[in-house]
Amino acid sequence: MEDSIGKVVIPGDILQNLDEKKGKIKVTVGPGLIRDGSHIAVTKSGILRHREPSVFWVDCHQKRYVPARGDNVIGIVTAKQGDVFKVDIGSSEPASLSFMAFEAATKRNRPNLNVGDCVNAKLLVANKDCEPELVCIDSYGRSSGLGILPNEGFLLQCSIGLVRQLLRNKFNVLTFLGKAIQYEVAIGMNGRIWLHCHTVRETIAISNAICRSELMSDEEVQIMSKKVVDSLQGFE
Amino acid sequence: MAAFKESDRKKTKLSSSVMKMKFMIKTREREEAAEAWKLVDAETALQDSLQESKFITEPSYAVVENLRFGRISFKGFNPDVERLMLKLDNEDQLSASEAREELSAVSDKEMTRRYTSLVGTIAQKFLKKRARATDEDTGSDEDSDGLADAEPESQVATVEKTISQSRRQNLKKKPKFMKPAD
């Protein structure tokens, strides 16, 4: 199957011999591919990618979020139901978040979370047959960057491809802007970016720059971010 | 699953009567939560084991593309987040270097092979000289590729003889001492 790596595949395509030459290493089948008996079938249209030693997935443009176990997402609390919060993560069904799934939470000491708050959470259960379940702690019970996002930021929505692009490259629009501007972001795999800056001007500029950078090359992104920084600092 | 079992073995359990006491409430709650986690993990492990072993299905782009953690701060805006970023970066580098090391390291098989030969050589060191000599003899006999015949041995013997003779001559010559006046 070496010849179709880097080429366009469409749903229904069947990939054979994915496991050849790999010996004992198990083949990891990523998103966009499913196991269908002894061979692998494609479920998304996009480009077939491969990473050593034997990881295969389909790289595609997508705006609809489909929950996947282990993803970090940004959700908005929509309701409190007994001991769980209902959280909108952009999927077909709202996810549930137990009030015990926070750092240092006990039955008496509940987290202070209200309807409309943003949370950065990890998907613990993402099954097509049942409700997705979120947690804000890791397996050691520590928050490790997850949890309630402060009420001061700005939430913007973008495509899932852009989110992956921002998290894949060490040098992207965020780092270029980060050399000149003080800010923080939380990026969710569900296409939501939470942005927190000192001023509204910076927030607008950075959010526009992020959205624009999706279809740009690295050089173009660099030039654009330089322009943004210059105009923010009063140079035209 | 295996990890859980290991941790179980390490942990010494308190008796149930102690756990019921009032000051143990927090610990009990923590243990209960851990139990719940185990259940969840057991479910997913079961799902994995039901599938055929040749492939691993991984639905998340984050794992497949090796994406980094999505909480980023710049120029010290949020020091907590920056500390976390630094920590994750270090962990990444560590795992990468470990993977590199694994590639270049000696495999278990190689190690056992080396050690089996090493055991013989070190054992010789602790043998007495006579035992070592006989050991070597038997060893060479066992090897016996037909090369260990008498010929090289006799050659060695003759060489040794000549050396000892010349040495003796040297010894005889030495007492004769020449004065500078002569």
Image (spheres, coloured by chain):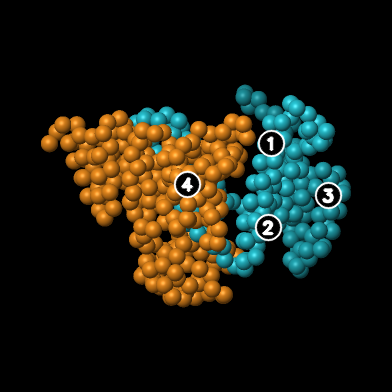
Chain colours: A orange, B cyan
Three-letter amino acid code of the residue under disc 4: Val
Please name which of the two marks, 4 or 1, marks the residue nearer to the observer: 4
Q: Are marks 3 and 4 in contact (CB under 8 Å)?
A: no
Both marks 4 and 1 on one chain = no
Please state if B146 lies on the left or on the right of A89 as rendered: right
Residue at numbered disc 1: B29
Residue at numbered disc 2: B109
Residue A46 x, y percent position in the rendering: 37, 66
Instruction: Choose top left, top right, bottom left or bottom right for residue A38.
Output: bottom right
Mark drawn on residue B132 = 3
Q: Mark 2 falls on what kind of element?
A: helix
Q: Chain of mark 4?
A: A
Residue A32 x, y percent position in the rendering: 45, 65
Please name which of the two marks, 3 or 4, marks the residue nearer to the observer: 4
Residue at numbered disc 4: A87
Q: Chain of mark 3?
A: B
Residue A27 x, y percent position in the rendering: 54, 65
Q: Are marks 1 and 3 in contact (CB under 8 Å)?
A: no
The residue drawn where x is 63% and y is 35% is A107
Q: Which is nearer the N-term, disc 2 or disc 1?
A: 1
Both marks 2 and 1 on one chain = yes
Mark drawn on residue B57 = none
Please name which of the two marks, 2 or 4, marks the residue nearer to the observer: 4
Q: Mark 1 falls on what kind of element?
A: helix
* Residue A56 appears in the figure: yes
How far apart are the two marked residues, 2 and 3, measured between alpha carbons? 29 Å
Viewport quadrant of the C terminus of chain B: top right
